[in-house]
């Protein structure tokens, strides 16, 4: 079973709205030695990211051979235009997209815990919209283990939901200190029942703090979103780091994630999957990966975390 654990669902997208994320990806592309045209990236984003019924997502999944996608909304209470009503509408629409494509999509609500109504929003997302977890972006400026967040995590714990939360440095305006993996440490103490997926494993440069936590906390997992940037740029280093991560924390902690449709502005998910599939054959001679490890990363681990039934593959 192939599972993409990190997909950004969007109901609509304008060039203005896409600009911030396109800037991030443009920055990544430059680091990778690519030279994409910024305006073309922006146009593609505006034309293809909005996918309210998730029909385009399903087409892309079928094309890439992905069985299940974990799709998420992102809330940011710093933006006056993103009202609680607006983000709840997006969360509701994500729930509807999940129902429209049975068995293919798992939805995570976007909720900024700084909103006074955040806990009630979470309750509605679980009980009425059928969402299975919450996506956080603490780099927007909040403590993921602070008192406001805890009110939301209480609801999450009650519904046996999954917390997928951004970790790792970003360009300004990202308030990176809140996205440090160690900011999540208390969640395992106060909510041992919550399964946490730290997006990006803290980042392909900053993964050690995540690994230091994951080695001690049973429910700490991470996804490989954006690690394909490193794989593209320096496959040997990607292999070396991933081998080190697995040796230190075990293969059961790591999930494949694409960060589509943002990261896929540069190349298709198939390319990202191939970086992982190629590990047993194409890693440098002194570094060994097994097919079992690859299968866990590409879907086995996410299947266990979300309690999915067996599929044929
Ligand atoms: Zn993301």
Image (cartoon, rainbow, N blue to C red):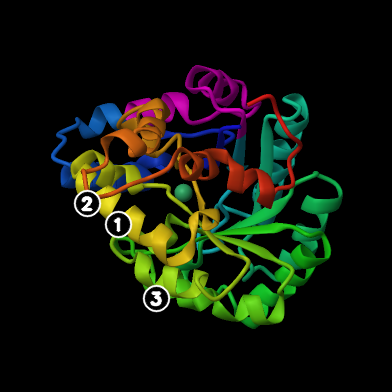
Residue 40: quarter of image: top left
- Would residue 117 be visible to someone looking at this image? no
Tell me what residue is drawn at x 73 percent, y 74 percent. Answer: 151
Quarter containing the N terminus: top right
* The disc label shown at residue 177, or none: 3
Tell me what residue is drawn at x 42 percent, y 42 percent. Answer: 290
Please state the extent of the stretch shown in magenta in the rendering.
Answer: 42-68
Residue 117 drawn at (x, y percent): 74, 66
Residue 57 lies in the magenta-colored region: yes
Name the one closer to the observer, 150 or 299.
299
Tell me what residue is drawn at x 61 percent, y 28 percent. Answer: 67
Residue 246: quarter of image: bottom left
Q: Residues within 10 Å of mark 2 (few under 14, many from 20)?
A: some
- As drawn, is 222 to the left or to the right of 228? right
- Asked whether disc 3 touches disc 2, contact meaning CB atoms under 8 Å apart, the reply is no
- Would residue 154 be visible to someone looking at this image? yes
* The disc label shown at residue 10, or none: none
Q: Mark 3: which secondary structure?
A: helix
- As drawn, is 70 to the left or to the right of 156? left
Tell me what residue is drawn at x 63 percent, y 76 percent. Answer: 187
Name the one closer to the observer, 274 or 110.
274
Q: Mark 1: which secondary structure?
A: helix
- The residue beneath circle 2 is 237
- The residue beneath circle 1 is 241
- As drawn, is 128 to the left or to the right of 110? right
Name the one closer to the observer, 55 or 296.
296
* Main SS class of the magenta portion in the image: helix
- Asked whether disc 1 touches disc 2, contact meaning CB atoms under 8 Å apart, the reply is yes
Q: Earlier in the sequence, mark 3 or mark 1?
A: 3
Residue 97: quarter of image: top right
Quarter containing the C terminus: top right
> In this rendering, is residue 305 above or below 90?
below
């Amino acid at each position: 079973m192939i599972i993409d654990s990190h997909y950004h669902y969007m109901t609509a997208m304008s060039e203005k709205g896409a600009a911030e994320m396109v800037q991030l990806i443009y920055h990544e592309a430059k680091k990778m030695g690519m030279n994409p045209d910024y305006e073309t990236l922006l146009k593609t984003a505006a034309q293809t990211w909005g996918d309210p019924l998730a029909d385009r997502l399903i087409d892309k999944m079928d094309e890439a051979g992905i069985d299940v996608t974990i799709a998420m909304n992102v809330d940011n209470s710093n933006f006056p235009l993103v009202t609680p009503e607006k983000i709840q509408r997006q969360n509701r629409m994500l729930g509807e997209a999940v129902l429209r494509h049975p068995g293919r999509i798992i939805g995570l609500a976007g909720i900024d815990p700084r909103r006074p109504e955040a806990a009630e929003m979470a309750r509605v997302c679980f009980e009425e919209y059928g969402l299975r977890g919450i996506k956080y972006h603490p780099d927007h400026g909040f403590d993921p283990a602070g008192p406001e967040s805890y009110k939301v995590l209480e609801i999450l714990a009650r519904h046996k939901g999954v917390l997928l939360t951004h970790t790792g440095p970003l360009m300004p305006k990202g308030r990176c200190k809140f996205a440090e993996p160690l900011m999540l440490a208390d969640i395992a103490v106060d909510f041992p029942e919550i399964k946490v997926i730290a997006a990006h494993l803290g980042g392909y440069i900053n993964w050690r703090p995540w690994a230091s936590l994951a080695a001690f906390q049973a429910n700490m997992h991470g996804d490989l979103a954006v690690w394909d940037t490193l794989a593209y740029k320096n496959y040997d280093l990607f292999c070396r780091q991933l081998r080190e991560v697995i040796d230190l924390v075990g293969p059961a902690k790591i999930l494949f994630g694409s960060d589509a449709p943002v990261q896929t502005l540069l190349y298709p998910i198939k390319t990202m999957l191939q970086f992982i599939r190629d590990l047993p054959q194409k890693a440098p001679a002194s570094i060994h990966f097994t097919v079992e490890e690859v299968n866990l990363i590409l879907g086995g681990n996410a299947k266990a975390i979300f309690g999915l039934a067996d599929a044929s593959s």
